[in-house]
Amino acid sequence: MRTSWLAGMTTRGTSFLAAGAASAIAGYLLGEHGLLCVGIALVALPLLAAFAARRAQYRLSCVRRINPPRVPVGHVATVTLRVENVSRLPSGLMLAEDTVPYALGTRPRYVLDRIERNGVRELTYPLRSDLRGRFEIGPLQLRLADSFGLVELGRSFSARTTFVVTPRVVPLARTVISRSWAGEGEGSSRLASTAGEDDVIPRAYRDGDDMRRVHWRSTARYGELMVRREEQRWRNRATILLDARSTAHMGSGAASSFEYAVSAAASVGVHISQEGLTGQLITESQVVKGGPFFQDALLDSLAVIRPSARRDLSAAIRQLRASGSGVIVAVAGRISVAEAEQLAACRTEGSQAIALLLAVSTWADQERARPAGGAGSDAPDAGRPGGDHDSAGSSQQRLAAVADRRSPAADGADATETAAAGRVLRESGWHVVTVDASTPLAAAWQRLPRGAEMLVPAVALPSHPGTMES
C-alpha cells in the first residue's frame, strides 16, 4: 500500500521541509542563488531520510522464542527476539518495543543503533506472572529513525507467540496414590485379596490388558476378546472431579478458594500422570480425557478455567458415574448433604475415593481481615487486560462481593454443612480431609492414609481437630 512521503515526519523533519520550501521560494523570487540552494538542501534532506528509512523498514525479519512456553504461576520464562537485517544496506536507528499484556508487566523497549547487512541482534527479557492464563505475546513494533531525527516510521510484525501460565503445582507424597498398589507389580495380588473371591465373569478386552488374562471360552462365545475381571487393571485409572462453581467458593484473586482448588486439581493430575495412571479431569462444563499427553492437556485446560455459573454438581456427577471404576479424587468447595450423597454413590466397592473439602468460610474470613487498601494488590491484577484475563477480573470480583455480603452466622452454617457432607462421604467409604485457607496442600495430602490402607473397609475412628477420619 502506498503512503505519503510526509507520513512519519517528526516535528524536526516538518520544520526542515517548511524552512527549505520558504528559503527556496524566497531565493527564487529574490534571485539569490545561494539562498535557493540552501532551501533545496533543506527540502531534500528529510526526503532522502524518509527514503532511506522506508528502504530499511520492509527488509527486517523477526523470530520470537519463549523458553519455556509454559510455566507455573510465579515462575519466570525468558523471551528471545532475533531481529535480522535482510537488506543490502545497513539499517538506521531503531526503537524496538514488544507487545506484552499488562498483566505480565511493562512493555520492554530497546534502542538499536545500527544493524549491518545480514546482521542479527538478539534481545532478551524475562516474563513472570502471578496470574494463570493464556497470553498472546507480540507483535514486535519497530520505530525506525534516521541519524538526524527527521523521520520516524513505525512497523509492526505479524508474528505472535502463545505464553501459558499454569496453576501452581505442589509435589505430593507418593504414599497416597502410586503405581505400586494400583494394579501393577506386587501390589496386584494385594488388591485382589481385598476384593474377596476372584470374579470370573469376563469383560471386553481393553487396551493395555495382559493377554494372559484372556478368557478364550468367552472369546469364542462372544466373538471378541474377553478377559477375566480378577486382574483389577481398572485401578490404573484415576478421575479428578473439580468443583468450579462460583457459588461454592469465596475470596478474591490468587488468594481465593477457587484458585486453591485449581492448584490442588493440577497437583493431583500431575502426580497421577507421573505415577503412570491414566488420568481424567471432570468439571461442570468440560471433561479432559486421559491419554499419553494428559498432563499437558490438564495444565492447558486449568490455565484458563473460570468459575462456573452452575448451581449444582449434577452434571459433573453424571460424568463421574459414566467414567467407570477407578481412583476418584474430588476437590470440592461448599457442597450440600444431598450433593455429598450423590457423590458418595460414585464410589464402587473396593476402589479408592478421596475428597478434599475446602472450608470456604476461612477464605471469607481471610478476605474480611485484609485491610481496605490491601485488596488492591489482587484486584488490579485480576482485572488487567491481556490474554484470557478479561473475564477473570469480573469472576474474582463476584467471589469477593459474595464474601463481603456474608455474615459470620452464614459462615458458621457453611462450616456445619461441610462437616455434615464429610460425614456422609466417610460413611460411604470415602477418605476425607477438610482444608482451610492456612493449610498447605502438601500438608493436607499427607493427612490421608497410605494407598494400600485405603482399600481396607473403612472403620470409624474418633475425630480430632485438624485431622481426618477414615
Image: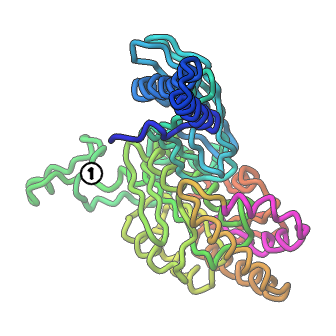
Name the residue located 34 percent from the left edge and 40 percent from the top edge: 2
Answer left or right for 447 relative to 209: right
From the viewer's side, name the closer residue of 249 and 290: 249
Numbered range of the magenta stretch? 355-383
Q: Position of residue 39 (x, y in %)?
A: 56, 26
Q: Position of residue 43 (x, y in %)?
A: 52, 28
Q: Is residue 191 above or below residue 195?
A: above
Q: Quadrant of the N terminus?
A: top left
Regarding residue 188, the answer to whether it shows in the image is: no
**Magenta region includes residue 381:** yes
Q: Residue furthest front?
A: 30
Bin the neighbour count of mark 1 within 10 Å (Cα to Cα): few under 14, some 14-19, many 20 and up.
Answer: few
Answer left or right for 235 relative to 442: left
Residue flagged by tag 1: what amino acid is it?
A: Arg
Q: Position of residue 193 (x, y in %)?
A: 47, 53
Name the residue located 61 percent from the left edge and 75 percent from the top edge: 246
From the viewer's side, name the closer residue of 333 and 66: 66
Q: Is residue 256 above or below residue 15?
A: below
Regarding residue 378, the answer to whether it shows in the image is: yes
Number of marks drawn: 1
Q: Position of residue 446 (x, y in %)?
A: 72, 51
Q: Quadrant of the C terminus?
A: bottom right
Q: Judging from the image, what secondary structure is the residue with disc 1 in? A: loop
Q: Is residue 143 above or below residue 260?
A: above
Name the residue located 70 percent from the left edge and 64 percent from the top edge: 433
Tell me which secondary structure the magenta stretch mostly adopts: helix
Name the residue located 43 percent from the left edge and 66 percent from the top edge: 286
Q: Which residue is disc 1 drawn over?
A: 206
Q: Is residue 409 above or below residue 12?
A: below
From the viewer's side, name the closer residue of 42 and 148: 42
Q: How is the image coloured?
A: rainbow
**Magenta region includes residue 131:** no
